[in-house]
């Protein structure tokens, strides 16, 4: 009892001391008046890997551009851990990589202790280690610069309460991926071995119990931290589901799809089927096991069985994908063997590691796009096929089902299937349509990917984050 009181008192003293320190950092910050002569609202973006050039960084720069364009009186600051690059390098890379030019300058605050959030720093209890590490990194950020509004764009939920309670910021976050998901909890509970559940733990009931307890406790704390956010944005329905479960529905997450770069595909000309002597079914996916190319080859063979000899000659399956290691290569060999044994090898082309320009011309020439991964979180490949004007047949689960292959302006945008027969029947149906019927779907599919454009991202991001700035 006494111990508890002592601990609470100590925590209180620590909290007050930190708060004082943060106040003093704030009071020494220079503040230049904005263009309207008033003190600007400062917005801090926590993105320790802001120079990585991936999809998460596209979100960051698009968000900053949208805010700068919309609000003349805000000033954006990025907390970066990329100490080897200067602010100018980072801005330049965003321009080169994403064609994003910011209307106004951005300040950078460089953090020295990024190793604190790296998985390799914590051989054990990695989730907890990284999360507590992110709090320390967040403290470094706060001691260097205190913003008025704080936005975490990399999923470091444990930093949210720091900025909210120590610095009294309004806080928001954009979540690409939950730190812990209900799927991970159930894998441990069912004792299934996987990348985050090693075999020796899955086999041992006591260790499994302990790990489940740890995960549950972690998920609970993660939820408490996340729920401190005034505005929660998530990148897809899949992420929405997990955040809603773990953080609670009162956090009211908004789905803000990240901007996908589909211009390269939407600018391709759609070739009407009459002009093609051969109809191509194209699949674009890395040769990884979860992509389930086997299902594609089997479905294709089931389709071929439904066709006459003459019709068969006019159909090809193109498996386009990168093949990065021996695992991928052996899967390709297995797929070749499978298509031979099913008697369709003469109609299947493997296009491995082809250049982007060739990929585009193959997609432009295709009629049907094929996707078969179960429970894919999103499915950028599906979006690209649709942008290219293919009629997609995607797996009836995950992102394709929830976010992508859904009616758009009351028009059908593609098809979903989940079994060999289902895929074969659907492809048959598509082949039997008139060219006009197909064209209608192809055009609808192409316009529907507007939902994943930069313009749409900016609109939904500004709407969701509005209450941070009023
Ligand atoms: C880059 O962005 C500008 C302005 O937003 C646009 O006009 C131009 O077409 C874009 N360039 C490419 C290669 O997408
Ligand atoms: C959301 O982010 C995760 C993790 O980066 C990614 O796997 C998923 O494809 C993203 N969803 C969308 C809609 O881009």
Image (cartoon, rainbow, N blue to C red):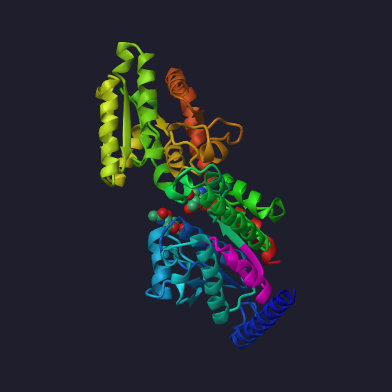
At 29% from the left and 42% from the top, the residue drawn is: 327
Query: What residue sits 56% from the left and 79% below the top?
Result: 145
- Tell me where residue 101 appears, x and y as whole percent: 46, 64
| 164 sits to left or right of 179 | right
Seen in the picture, residue 110 relative to 350 is either above or below; the reply is below
Q: Is residue 169 magenta?
A: yes
Q: Residue at x 43, y 23 (%)?
A: 420
| The one of 427 and 105 positioned closer to us in this rendering | 427
Instruction: Say if 136 sits above or below 131 in the image.
Output: below
Q: Is residue 57 above or below residue 417?
A: below
Q: In this rendering, would 347 be left or right of 93?
A: left
The image quadrant that residue 55 belongs to is bottom left
For residue 413, side relative to residue 265 (left or right):
right
The answer to whether 53 is drawn above or below residue 409 in the figure is below
In the orientation shown, which residue stands out farthest toward the top? 308
Number of numbered callouts drawn: 0
Left or right: residue 52 compared with residue 105: left
Q: Which residues are magenta?
A: 149-172
Residue 388 percent location from the top left of the image: 41, 38
Note whether residue 115 is visible: yes
Q: How far across and down, in percent of the image, does residue 135 sit? A: 56, 71
> Toward the viewer: 354 or 9?
9
Q: In the picture, which quadrant includes the N terminus?
A: bottom right
Q: Is residue 32 magenta?
A: no
């Amino acid at each position: 009892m006494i111990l508890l009181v002592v601990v609470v008192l100590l925590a209180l003293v620590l909290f007050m001391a930190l708060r004082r320190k943060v106040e003093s950092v704030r009071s020494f910050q220079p503040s230049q008046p904005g263009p309207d002569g008033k003190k600007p609202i400062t917005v801090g973006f926590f993105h320790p890997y802001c120079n990585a050039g991936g999809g998460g960084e596209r979100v960051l720069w698009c968000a900053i551009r949208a805010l700068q364009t919309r609000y003349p009186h805000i000033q954006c600051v990025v907390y970066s851990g990329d100490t080897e690059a200067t602010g100018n390098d980072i801005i330049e890379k965003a321009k080169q990589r994403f064609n994003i030019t910011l209307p106004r300058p951005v300040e950078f605050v460089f953090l020295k202790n990024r190793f604190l959030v790296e998985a390799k720093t914590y051989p054990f209890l990695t989730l907890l280690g990284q999360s507590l590490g992110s709090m320390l990194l967040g403290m470094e950020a706060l001691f260097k610069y205190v913003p008025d509004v704080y936005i975490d764009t990399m999923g470091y939920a444990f930093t949210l309460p720091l900025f909210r309670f120590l610095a009294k910021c309004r806080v928001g976050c954009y979540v690409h991926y939950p730190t812990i998901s209900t799927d991970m909890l159930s894998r441990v509970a069912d004792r299934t071995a996987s990348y985050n559940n090693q075999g020796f733990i899955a086999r041992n009931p006591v260790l499994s119990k302990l790990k489940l307890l740890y995960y549950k406790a972690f998920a609970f704390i993660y939820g408490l931290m996340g729920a401190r956010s005034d505005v929660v944005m998530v990148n897809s329905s899949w992420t929405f589901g997990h955040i809603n479960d773990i953080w609670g529905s009162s956090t009211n997450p908004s789905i803000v799809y990240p901007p996908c770069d589909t211009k390269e595909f939407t600018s391709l000309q759609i070739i009407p089927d009459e002009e093609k002597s051969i109809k191509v079914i194209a699949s674009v996916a890395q040769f990884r096991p979860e992509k389930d190319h086997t299902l594609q080859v089997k479905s294709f063979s089931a389709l071929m069985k439904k066709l006459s000899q003459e019709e068969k000659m006019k159909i090809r399956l193109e498996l386009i994908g990168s093949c990065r290691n021996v695992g991928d290569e052996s899967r390709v060999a297995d797929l070749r063997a499978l298509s031979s044994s099913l008697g369709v090898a003469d109609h299947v082309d493997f296009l491995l590691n082809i250049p982007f320009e060739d990929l585009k011309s193959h997609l432009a020439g295709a009629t049907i796009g094929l996707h078969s991964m179960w429970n894919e979180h999103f499915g950028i490949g599906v979006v690209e096929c649709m942008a290219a004007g293919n009629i997609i047949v995607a797996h009836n689960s995950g992102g394709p089902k929830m976010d992508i292959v859904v009616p758009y302006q009351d028009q059908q945008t593609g098809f979903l299937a989940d079994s060999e027969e289902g895929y074969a029947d659907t492809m048959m149906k598509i082949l039997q349509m008139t060219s006009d019927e197909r064209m209608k779907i192809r055009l609808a599919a192409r316009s529907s990917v507007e939902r994943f454009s930069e313009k749409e991202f900016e609109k939904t991001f500004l709407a969701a984050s509005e209450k941070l700035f009023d």
